[in-house]
Amino acid sequence: MALRALDPIATHLRYVFVHAREGSSVPLERPVHVANELARRGFNADPDAVTLIASSPDPELALDRTLETVPEDALKLTADHVHDAVDTRARSPEEMVRGDVRTDADAPESTPDEDPSASTGTNSEKSTDGSVSSPVETKGVNAGQSGVASEGSSGTEGAGGPQSATAEGVRSDAGDARSDAESARSDAEGTRSDSTRTPADPSKQSLTVSGDIQSTGTGEYADFVSVFRDRYEKLSKKLRSRVNHRPTDAIDSMPGNSDAALVGMVSDIRSTASGHWLVELEDTNGTFPCLVMKDREFAHLVDELLLDEVIAVEGTLADDGGILFVDSLHFPDIPRTHDPSTADRHVEAALISDVHVGSDEFMADAWHRFADWLHTAEADPVEYLLLAGDMVEGVGVYPDQDEELSIVDIYEQYEAFSEHLKAIPGDIEIVMIPGNHDAVRLAEPQPAFDEELRSIMSAHDARISANPSVATVEGVDVLMYHGVSLDEVIAELPDEKATYDDPHLPMYQLLKKRHVAPQFGGQTRLAPEEEDLLVIEEVPDIFHAGHVHKLGYGKYHNVLTINSGCWQAQTPFQERMNIDPDSGFAPIVRLDTLELTVRDFE
Ligand code: D5M
Ligand code: FE
Ligand code: ZN
């Protein structure tokens, strides 16, 4: 009985494993995706080669052909390798070099349909979700203003990257955000506060951290089966009350034309010859094909689907009962009625990530401006510092990374990080989780730093926990997740639903799916455990991630969502990829009001 119930999930996993081995399904039309894909397959490449592949009419094919034909002893993929592999006869060599290189800016922006059933504010212009926040951005050493982070205030901006705003209202020239930030910087020159910090009263503080794991997984196939079963259990529970669902095998035996609903894990997404969508859903009893017609107003939700996420559908069976015509599609989601908890007093938390100590590009000066500011009276309310991963640059994380290290020994990197941590006032409570550059296993959930690393970082008695974890700070639940899955969400979803420039939008998707790393087998590595600890079981009040090195914030169904940028200047990789990181910003949340202020220490 138990074994029978296990089978479909096992089939699902076999499918996932095969796909993982075959390569990812990430579309490659952007240079960054090509570079990621090459790195994933263990290749270094010249920027020209990356650009050539990305700009070819069929980047997937160009990449595959190039890798098939590149000589085994080649150290680096060059433009010549791409030329040799890809048929260039249709275009002149000149055209190939000039290419019709598509940059992010040139990429066609498709306008999403207005759809009341869509529960995400994915369009920053329209902000259907009311995801407007307008934090004040101030120079760290300047006098602070009170921030505004209210939902649906002016409706002109879905929050987003660095921008400056007044307490009265949002500035509408978001397009010029960068120069606003720059002028905020220069305005503040030389206005340093002299008064010093009054230490926090520990009797008023309260902090608990949950999510730390003792890894139980042995890496056996059966562990993968149990983690997927647990994911299905946890997420289907959230959907069952919303639809009158039946198991797939019961639907199999229902007569044609019946109304039916099911809750399942997405096991395949295909478009049909006529442009409709065939979504295969799987539960513990079997699989069932569901058809989403392309002209339905919710058809665009299919663009948001990732393999392995759990959704519910309602619809009508075909005449022969063999397929379900979908009338509505539901995500586990965050209830719109979520009423976030707040602290009982005026106290603030700084949310940062991606410090990257040990990298040539680590911005020590900005870090120390931040630490110095924390020592001023103006920063008295800041009693918590949450660090969402990538404390150090690490060693061997990406190809050729060793050429960009200021400290080449991983333990020395943590020692240096610990010194930088000592610059933070001792009364500030610190929570740290690891990221993909840290010296813990890459597969998620990532366990907390081991004893050796803890002893190196002991100086500040920080709370050290797993990735992901929930920090409950004076009653406010902060879900902390480093963010590796964001690369995948951004690669898989259309630009209007997730981009690097609005890194809070892919975070909204994770909240909607109630899982921090929905798709298994691509770039995101998942560890087999008995339980799926990556399910977002409880609705957080704040969702904090990093990893993409871009600052972005907004509210999704009242959950304050923040991607915190980084403390590392642009790396050569990012320069090649045209990624402009948001470095040296500290988003600071007032915990009694959930107002956000972004301070700039660059
Ligand atoms: O990741 C910072 C961001 O940049 C994240 O979106 C991944 C991407 N990135 C950075 N370097 C590389 C290389 N070499 N290959 C692929 N993707 C990369 P972080 O985790 O801080 O490195
Ligand atoms: Fe990072
Ligand atoms: Zn990272």
Image: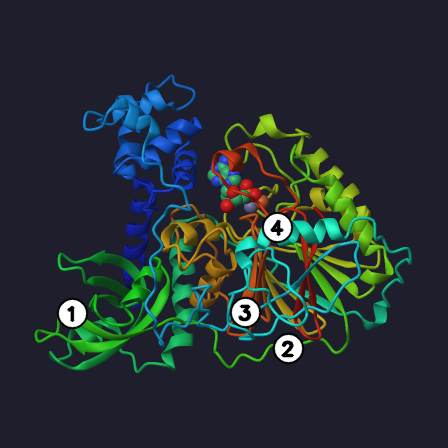
In this rendered view, identify the residue nearer to me: 410 or 579.
579
Ligand 2 positioned in quadrant: top right
Q: CA distance from mark 2 to mark 3?
A: 19 Å
On screen, residue 196 versus residue 533, left or right, reads: right
Q: Determine whether 378 is above or below 540 in the image.
A: above
Q: Any atom of ligand 3 within 8 Å of the CB at mark 2?
A: no
Query: In terms of secondary structure, where does tag 1 sit?
Result: loop
Q: CA distance from mark 4 to mark 2?
A: 35 Å
On screen, residue 596 versus residue 246, left or right, reads: right
Query: In terms of secondary structure, where does tag 4 sit?
Result: helix
* Sequence-first tag of 2 and 3: 3
Disc 1 residue type (three-letter):
Ile
Residue under the image location 57 percent in, 62 percent down:
553
Q: Any atom of ligand 1 within 8 Å of the CB at mark 1?
A: no
Is residue 458 shown to the viewer in this render? no
Q: CA distance from mark 4 to mark 3?
A: 21 Å
Residue that mark 3 sits on:
132
Residue that mark 4 sits on:
179
